[in-house]
Amino acid sequence: MPEDIKSMYEEELREEFAAMGEPSYRAAQVYQWLQSGVQSFDEMTNISKKLRQKLMDKYYISSAAIEKKLISDYDDTKKYLFSFRDGEAVESVLMSYHHGYTSCISTQVGCRMGCTFCATGKSGFSRNLTASEMIAQLQAEQKDNNIRISNVVLMGMGEPLDNFDNVMRFLNLVGSEKGMNIGMRHISLSTCGLVPKIYELADQKLQLTLSVSLHAPNDAIRSRTMPVNKRYHIEELLKACRYYIRQTNRRISFEYAMIDGVNDSDDCARELASRLRGMICHVNLIPVNTVGGTGYQKSKRERMQSFISILEKSGITATIRRTLGSDINASCGQLRRSVYRQNAAKEEQTE
């Protein structure tokens, strides 16, 4: 079974090459080729044909093939459906801002968390992504658009902290000076609240931005919409968040999907403010996405403004997230579901 070479650190490659009787500088050359986005060993033009064959026999290079691409008519946001060597597919979204390009990538094929307002979880969970498959999403977007991505958001399909080891390896690789060289302050990681992993992440003392999907001010509402809350209650989660802040001295962003009639009342805002008071944090209000089968509707604009006003009076900064790619369902999970349904319908017609 071939090994995943693009998920290896340069030091690990040196050890592999030494075992093959190859000089260490060859490992450095191959590492740079891998980080540049080559999809085959034959593209490594400064490597001998004999060594390339040895590499082909032992390793494979992860790549992300574009299965489908949607482009927003409003803001040039691009949504990709990428497939990997085993046929599994994930979504990624490329967004253009005045400061550069941001990519929101997936960390798992599907998700185990089962949040009721999320399209990804409705498709079930298949497997974790490797570090190389996360990098491949970025490389494919860069190549397709002839750009350099400067910011990364781990907020696509999957729960990043449920794939902790591969995500940590990805962060180290993508931050490498010989790799994409994207600094931690340009990376955001989103979690639904896996408390033990938040503590573990905090102890890494990385300078990334942690985004916590809170979406409710109390256990009663959160447990109805987010099954993870039945395992880790809000106070337990917020305790972990305070520890993260102490360890990293970084502000936490709390994501809050505004769902009409569910979690958007003034009482909810006041309760949320009382829980977050004193924390270095920011609340990001998100009009909930329309996902078939949930029955959820996004809160009205005036309701969101009232919610923000209550938070700000309590000294908590809050904003309404700018919606990009609304005409292409830019929230992850929906494109994959629609394509799989279309393929299933075609298969039924041919049977």
Image (cartoon, rainbow, N blue to C red):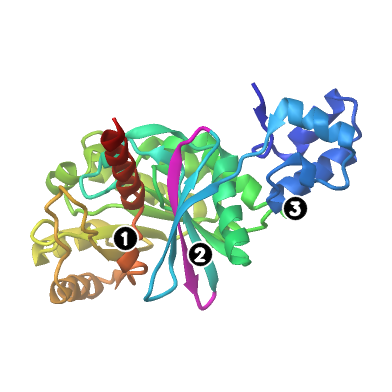
Residue depicted at x 87% and y 36%: 49
| Labels 1 and 2 touching (C-beta < 8 A) | no
Give x and y (percent) for residue 3.
Answer: 66, 27
Magenta residue check for 238: no
Q: Determine the secondary structure under disc 1.
A: loop
**Front in this rendered view, residue 179 or 2:** 2
Q: Amino acid at mark 2?
A: Thr
Q: Amino acid at mark 1?
A: Asn
Magenta residue check for 90: yes
Residue depicted at x 34% and y 63%: 328
Q: Nearer the viewer, mark 1 or mark 3?
A: 1
| Labels 1 and 3 touching (C-beta < 8 A) | no
Determine which residue is flagged by label 1.
329
Q: Residue 113, can we see it?
A: no
Q: Residues within 10 Å of mark 2 (few under 14, many from 20)?
A: many
Q: Quadrant of the N terminus?
A: top right
Q: Number of marks in the image?
A: 3
Give x and y (percent) for residue 69.
Answer: 45, 58
Q: Quadrant of the C terminus?
A: top left
- CA separation in Å, label 1 and label 3: 35 Å
**Front in this rendered view, residue 62 or 244:** 62
Q: Earlier in the sequence, mark 1 or mark 3?
A: 3
Determine which residue is flagged by label 3.
178
Residue depicted at x 47% and y 59%: 250
Q: What is the quadrant of residue 237 in the picture?
A: top left
Q: Nearer the viewer, mark 1 or mark 2?
A: 1
Boundaries of the magenta span:
86-99
In this picture, is 327 found above or below 174? below
* In this picture, residue 87 sits left or right of residue 229: right
Q: Earlier in the sequence, mark 2 or mark 3?
A: 2
Determine which residue is flagged by label 2.
102
